[in-house]
Amino acid sequence: MVKKEIVSKNRDFRRVYTKGKYFSSPVLITYIIKNRLNSTRVGITASKKTGNAVKRNRSRRIIREAFRILKSKVKSGFDIIFVARAKTNEVKTGDVLKDMEYELYKLGVLK
């Protein structure tokens, strides 16, 4: 992902959490909100509840790879936040991809 495609400011995360829509599964939570940009920005978080640093980083890598595969199907103009859960680091990328695709479909972000 390019730097301009990443949600990195705390105020942007809070805006998505408070005003956006969300959908959750046992593996992943997805928040979305429309932005005023022409591009889609993505943020990935994993709290300490998900495990130690190795597990959190693996969770983020799995989520990043799953989104890279789906990126061409996602509409532009959204801020998307993915929150890793405790099971995220225990499953394969394909499982996260399947859940992510379903959640983005339910939220109306897929083309």
Image: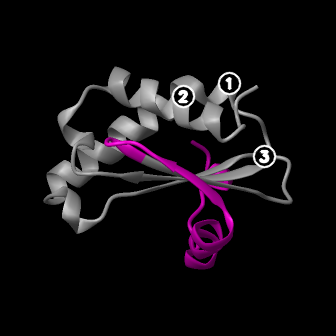
Amino acid, disc 3 = Ser
Q: Name the residue nearer the viewer: 76 or 54.
A: 76
Quarter of the figure with the C terminus: top right
Gap between marks 1 and 2 measured at Cα: 12 Å
- Where residue 60 sits: x, y (%)? 35, 47
Other-residue count near label 2 (Cα within 10 Å), few / some / many at <14 / 14–19 / ≥20: many
Q: Quadrant of residue 87?
A: top left
The answer to if 64 sits in the magenta stretch is no
The answer for how far apart the CA atoms under marks 1 and 3 are is 12 Å
Callout 2: SS: helix
Circle 1 crowding by C-alpha within 10 Å: few under 14, some 14–19, many from 20:
few
**Marks 2 and 3, the one that precedes in the sequence:** 3
Name the amino acid, label 1. Ser
For disc 2, the marked residue is 101
Q: Residue 19's x, y, as percent? A: 68, 70
Residue at position x 32%, y 43% from top?
26
Cα distance in 3D space between marks 2 and 3: 19 Å
Examine the image and state in which quarter residue 88 appears. top left
What residue is drawn where x is 38% and y is 31%? 96
Amino acid type of the residue tagged 2 in the rendering = Glu
The range drawn in magenta is: 1-28
Which residue has dot 3 on it?
A: 39
